[in-house]
Amino acid sequence: MSVLWLLLGLLALTDSSESSNWGCYGNIRNFETPGASCGIGKRHGLNYCGVRASERLAEIDMPYLLRYQPVIRTVGQKYCVDPAVIAGVLSRESHGGNVMANVGNMGDGIGVVQDPGLYAPTSWISESQVSQITEVLTVRIKEIQRRFPTWTSDQYLRGGLCAYAGAPGYIRSSQDLSCDFCNDVLARAKYFRRHGF
């Protein structure tokens, strides 16, 4: 019986040390999210929305993202961002690297192609591109931290994701933390976390 308790204790320690590596900007396991809007679902040929749609889109993108898992983990450690969140952003923005054509700052938003009909798929997303995307996200999170110093780390992550999609000025209060981009990315990230990211 004591051997069983010892094994259970070791498993608990392994799991907690794994999740503590990514605690700088909130714990996605704690997030409740409505998932993708019905518009996102329809745009991708789904007749449903919400978490179910986000998870289906993440599932479709998973084979593409698995190619980048080592890069995503390296970048995640560098910026202290949960790799599942990075995978969620890549899934939402580029279908896992399948349609990304340009990464860069374009005005207030991020210049990541979102329409697969306009651009040919790329063969590889570089570590520098994943780093650039992640750095922009962390800059947005830190801007939200400066503007709202009493918020929680979970609110900072939500705010950073909404600011990533809509520019920092988009966030004026905690009521702005439920944007479609954030809700969809978090639902996808939770899926990716459950599947090895």
Image (spheres, helix red, strand yellow):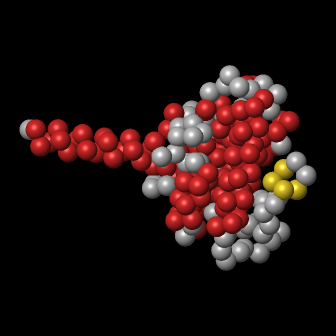
Horizontal relation, residue 2 to residue 179: left or right = left
Give the image location of residue 152, x and y in percent: 62, 27
Comparing 119 with 147, the one in front is 147
Residue shown at 55% from the left, 70% from the top: 67
Residue shown at 52% from the left, 40% from the top: 23
Residue farthest to the right?
107
Comparing 48 with 81, the one in front is 81
Residue shown at 57% from the left, 40% from the top: 24
Give the image location of residue 140, x and y in percent: 75, 43
Horizontal relation, residue 126 to residue 52: left or right = right
Comparing 56 with 77, the one in front is 77
The answer to whether any part of residue 152 appears in the image is: yes
Residue shown at 50% from the left, 38% from the top: 29
Give the image location of residue 105, x and y in percent: 84, 56
Give the image location of residue 167, x and y in percent: 83, 43
The answer to whether any part of residue 180 appears in the image is: no
Of the 4 image quadrants, the one containing the N terminus is top left
In this rendering, is residue 159 above or below 185? above
Residue farthest to the bottom?
123
Comparing 109 with 195, the one in front is 109
Where on the picture, by quarter, is residue 95?
Answer: bottom right
